[in-house]
Image (cartoon, rainbow, N blue to C red):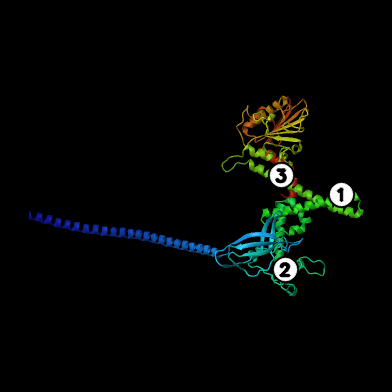
């Protein structure tokens, strides 16, 4: 019994020892886990504290920046308040003006807030006139640049009179990093200064060769400045000439002849003009050329009327004038050819889908070929593009676009109707003659494919033929439109030949064109030639017809 108790006590002691050891191990593990968690939490807290500190520093930095911005703005406002506030009062032609030079006296008043201000005088500005922009150049002597508040002061400016060095402009600083300031002095100026030393007793223009005028002085100074700055000016001039030639070649071929016959005027164009301003300047030069050309033509005709004094001199003059006319006509032709190129590009763009898979509406194509709700009496020849369909259509006597029969909004209307005699909607009286030829265009939206046997451009155009052939349709003035057995109809459906339209055309026994981009048929009973012209065929055929012109023009 005692032996058993001893064993039990021994195992109990061992168990207690094990439990104590296990408790110690668990405690150690718990401590390590707690330490690990504490370290992680500390790192998290440190990271959060760092983030908050960075946010605070960033916020503080932004506040400082904002404060600096506000400070600068307030200083600028304060500075502006300290500047003179100059108000224009009036302007009048100066007594210093003459037939050649217009000088203007401008009166200003200083309405600033303080007692007196320094004024930095402007020496040149641009003014708008009835003939466009003109340069105003300060021409009075700059004396005391101090203006009292409420004080009126007058300045004198020269309008449109300056010996300007065209290629020496404000871009000099941006290109080279410096300005040129010229000061003119000399014994002649000293001897001819006015008593008040604000002007010179020098006439603007010389009355004889022995007199030195202000015009002479400025002209010679301008020439010498150009010589002195020739290296810089030749570089600017070369770049300007290249840009003008490139612009004319690529964008405005109608000005090509100006490079030859109006060289001095072209060279007088300022450098670095944007395209819109450059085009304006070239247009002004072209108008000057055209006016001179008309004057020269009248002079030649007058010479013929009174009798040429010398046949040789007349022939030489005539040949030169004829060459000018030829160049001008070539320029006009180039402009029209360039216009055709643009129209073809617009048509190509118009038949393409946009980013959402949508196509242009029918009205876009319609207005491109012929403006809607217009007649040939209302628009110029250049305003329509019937040449896209057939060059001959451009020479028909009358065209109506989107105008209803009987001039009645409830009646049917052809997209485009062309006749070779006074037409259904013409202001000219209906003489009762039968029309020999009637052309009808029906235009559809690109890639349209919802046609049916009952509703399609073929049926639509034949319906127009039936109405017109009934001799019951009236013109704009209420007179009957007459057709007869000799009236020939030409019907053109301008659209994409989609699957449904192709099936309908085949059912009508249409024949495919050799290039497989169109379909045609002659309707004997209705005396109607019908052709379906795909947009691709129109663009391709028109491009081929005009290709030689595009190549010659380099576009």
SS category of the residue bearing label 2? helix
Residue 272 in view, yes or no:
no
**C-beta proximity under 8 Å, tags 3 and 1:** no
Residue 476 on image: x %, y %: 71, 31
Q: Which mark is in front, 2 or 3?
A: 2
SS category of the residue bearing label 3? helix
Residue at (89%, 55%) from the top-left corner?
313
Residue 382 on image: x %, y %: 73, 42
User: Residue under circle 1?
Assistant: 301
SS category of the residue bearing label 1? helix
Q: Is residue 529 above or below residue 30?
A: above
Q: Nearer the viewer, residue 392 or 67?
A: 67
User: Residue under circle 2?
Assistant: 225
Q: Mark 3 Cα within 10 Å, few/some/many (few <14, many 20+)?
A: many
Q: Is residue 399 above or below residue 113?
A: above
CA distance for labels 2 and 1: 45 Å
Residue 16: image quadrant is bottom left
CA distance for labels 2 and 3: 47 Å
Q: Is residue 209 left or right of residue 388?
A: right
Q: Mark 1 Cα within 10 Å, few/some/many (few <14, many 20+)?
A: few
Residue 127: image quadrant is bottom right
Task: Identify the mark at residue 340; answer none if there is no mark.
Answer: 3
Residue 238 in view, yes or no:
yes
Q: Which mark is in front, 2 or 1?
A: 1
Residue 334 on image: x %, y %: 75, 48
Q: Mark 2 Cα within 10 Å, few/some/many (few <14, many 20+)?
A: some
- Mark 2 or mark 3: whose residue is earlier in sequence: 2
Q: Which mark is in front, 3 or 1?
A: 1
- Mark 3 or mark 1: whose residue is earlier in sequence: 1
């Amino acid at each position: 019994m005692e032996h058993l108790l001893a064993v039990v006590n021994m195992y109990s002691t061992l168990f207690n020892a094990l439990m104590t050891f296990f408790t110690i191990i668990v405690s150690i593990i718990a401590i390590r886990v707690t330490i690990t968690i504490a370290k992680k939490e500390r790192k998290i807290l440190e990271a959060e504290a760092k983030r908050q500190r960075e946010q605070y520093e960033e916020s503080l930095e932004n506040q400082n920046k904002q404060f600096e911005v506000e400070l600068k703005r307030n200083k600028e406002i304060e500075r502006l308040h300290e500047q003179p506030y100059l108000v224009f009062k009036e302007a009048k032609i100066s007594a210093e003006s003459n037939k050649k030079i217009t000088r203007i006296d401008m009166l200003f008043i200083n309405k600033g807030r303080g007692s007196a201000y320094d004024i930095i005088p402007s020496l040149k500005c641009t003014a708008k006139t009835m003939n466009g922009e003109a340069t105003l150049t300060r021409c009075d002597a700059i004396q005391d640049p101090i203006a009292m508040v409420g004080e009126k002061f007058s300045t004198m400016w020269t309008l449109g009179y300056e010996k300007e060095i065209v290629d020496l402009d404000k871009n000099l600083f941006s290109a080279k990093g410096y300005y040129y300031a010229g000061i003119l002095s000399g014994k002649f100026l000293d001897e001819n200064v006015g008593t008040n030393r604000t002007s010179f007793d020098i006439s603007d223009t010389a009355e004889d060769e022995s007199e030195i005028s202000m015009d002479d002085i400025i002209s010679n100074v301008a020439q010498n400045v150009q010589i002195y700055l020739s290296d810089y000016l030749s570089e600017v001039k070369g770049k300007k000439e290249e840009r003008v030639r490139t612009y004319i070649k690529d964008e405005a071929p109608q000005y090509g002849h100006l490079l030859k016959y109006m060289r001095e005027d072209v060279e007088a164009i300022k450098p670095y003009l944007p395209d819109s301003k450059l085009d304006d300047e070239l247009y002004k030069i072209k108008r000057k050329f055209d006016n001179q050309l008309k004057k020269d033509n009248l002079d030649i005709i007058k010479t013929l009327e009174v009798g040429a004094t010398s046949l040789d001199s007349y022939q030489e003059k005539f040949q030169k004038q004829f060459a000018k006319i030829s160049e001008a006509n070539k320029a006009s032709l180039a402009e029209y050819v360039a216009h055709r190129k643009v129209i073809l590009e617009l048509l190509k763009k118009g038949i393409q889908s946009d980013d959402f898979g949508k196509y242009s509406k029918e009205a876009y194509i319609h207005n491109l070929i012929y403006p809607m709700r217009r007649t040939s009496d209302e628009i110029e020849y250049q305003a329509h593009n019937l040449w896209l369909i057939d060059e001959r259509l451009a020479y028909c006597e009358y065209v109506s676009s989107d105008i209803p029969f009987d001039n009645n909004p409830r009646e049917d209307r052809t997209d485009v109707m062309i006749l070779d005699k006074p037409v259904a909607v013409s202001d000219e009286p209906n003489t009762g003659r039968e029309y020999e030829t009637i052309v009808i265009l029906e235009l559809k939206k690109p890639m349209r494919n919802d046609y049916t046997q009952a509703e399609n451009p073929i049926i639509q155009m034949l319906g127009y033929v039936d109405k017109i052939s009934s001799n019951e349709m009236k013109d704009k003035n209420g007179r009957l439109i007459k057709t007869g057995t000799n009236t020939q109809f030409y019907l053109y459906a301008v659209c994409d030949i989609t699957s449904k339209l192709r099936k309908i055309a085949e059912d009508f026994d249409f024949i495919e064109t050799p290039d497989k981009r169109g379909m045609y048929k002659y309707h004997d009973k209705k005396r109607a030639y019908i052709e379906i012209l795909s947009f691709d065929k129109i663009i391709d055929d028109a491009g081929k017809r005009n290709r030689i012109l595009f190549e010659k023009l380099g576009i």
